[in-house]
Image (cartoon, grey):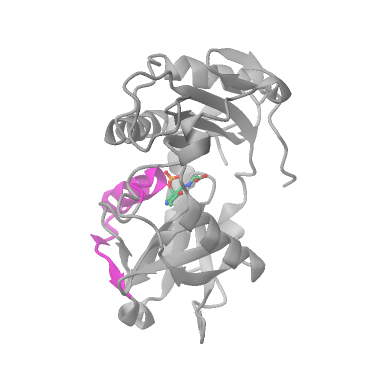
Amino acid sequence: MKLNYPKKVYLNGAWIHPEEAKISVFDRGFLFGDGIYEVIPFYKGKLFLLTEHLDRLRYSLKEVELKCGITNFEALISKSIEEAELEKEDGAIYIQITRGMAPRTHHFPENYQATVLMYAYKAKLDNFQYKFIDTLVSTDLRWHRCDIKSVSLMANILANTEAKKEGFAENIMIRDGCFTEGSHSSLFFVKNETVYTHPNGPFILPGITRNLLIKLCKANNIEVVERALPVSELDMATEVFITGTTTQITAIKNLHFPDKILNFGEEIGKITKKLQGLFIDEVEKQIGVKI
Ligand code: PDD
């Protein structure tokens, strides 16, 4: 899909054309990456898992002690779909909140006016169930608060750029001998019909799609274990997939290590397929849209 700028953005109280949207060179988001963000999907203009995404947004704000004064996120989010004229399209809302403008100091200023940016953009959210992708395995170089959706994403972008250079869309990361997650997705393995994923905590983002998937497993008698998978146990896995707001549930065909390639079959695995079907049904059940 061709990448475009949105038609309109919300910046600090006004809906304006992106060319008119200006922030200070002293914005702490620009100087320090002192800010958080959220990405919320919509299908045919209808928001999916909005409450869960807003809860995580509030969690990120709380964890970095960032006050933004916005109480009507729901209304602004709906308006962003209208402003972008995407009521009939699939896409996502991007929200970014930074600690605003202040003379540069490492500690936060006492008084500040948060910078709030929001816009809707079109994204291709159909046909994810047919993708069978290769990913690069890389070292997880991130900090110890990956549970915060921080805009400081240097380790993620370095890792993903390395993957991109080798022709892959995503990489999956290893910290202390265990798989954590992707640079912008959550990670799952299937072993003996049981689904494994890293537990929530400081080393992964509590993925909204990941949480839904765990619920779907539990409701459909698929055993799910939240435990970090050591690289040494990978040989026993028969299926690998990643999840995310725009990734949905994407099956992985080959994992590329520096010295070897591990293959997970020529066809998408049974459990992955089942979960993809359950996800599609859940979208229809919750917002009435057939993907
Ligand atoms: N990324 N892990 C990381 C590190 C992520 O950046 C994301 C999402 C996920 C999946 O989370 P969710 O299911 O809530 O989208 C896991 C977003 C989409 C992004 O950075 O654009």
State the residue lying farthest toward the right.
2
- Relative vertical location of residue 13 with respect to residue 254 in this rendering, above or below: above
The one of 43 and 155 positioned closer to us in this rendering: 155
The one of 222 and 149 positioned closer to us in this rendering: 149
Q: In which quarter of the image is the C terminus?
A: top right
- Residue 173 found in image quarter: bottom left
State the residue lying farthest toward the bottom.
259
229 on left or right of 83: left
Image location (x, y in percent) of residue 198: 30, 60
- Relative vertical location of residue 167 with respect to residue 60 in this rendering, above or below: below
- Relative vertical location of residue 79 with respect to residue 104 in this rendering, above or below: above
18 on left or right of 50: right
- Relative vertical location of residue 190 with respect to residue 71 in this rendering, above or below: below
Any magenta on residue 74?
no
Q: How many marks?
A: 0
**Which residue lies at the image location 29% right of the left edge and 59% below the top edge?**
222
Residues in magenta, as a range: 205-230
**Which residue lies at the image location 53% right of the left edge and 36% below the top edge?**
30
- Residue 92 found in image quarter: top right
**Which residue lies at the image location 58% right of the left edge and 66% below the top edge?**
163
192 on left or right of 86: left
Asked whether residue 19 appears in the rendered view, the answer is yes
Image location (x, y in percent) of residue 145: 31, 49
Image location (x, y in percent) of residue 220: 30, 52
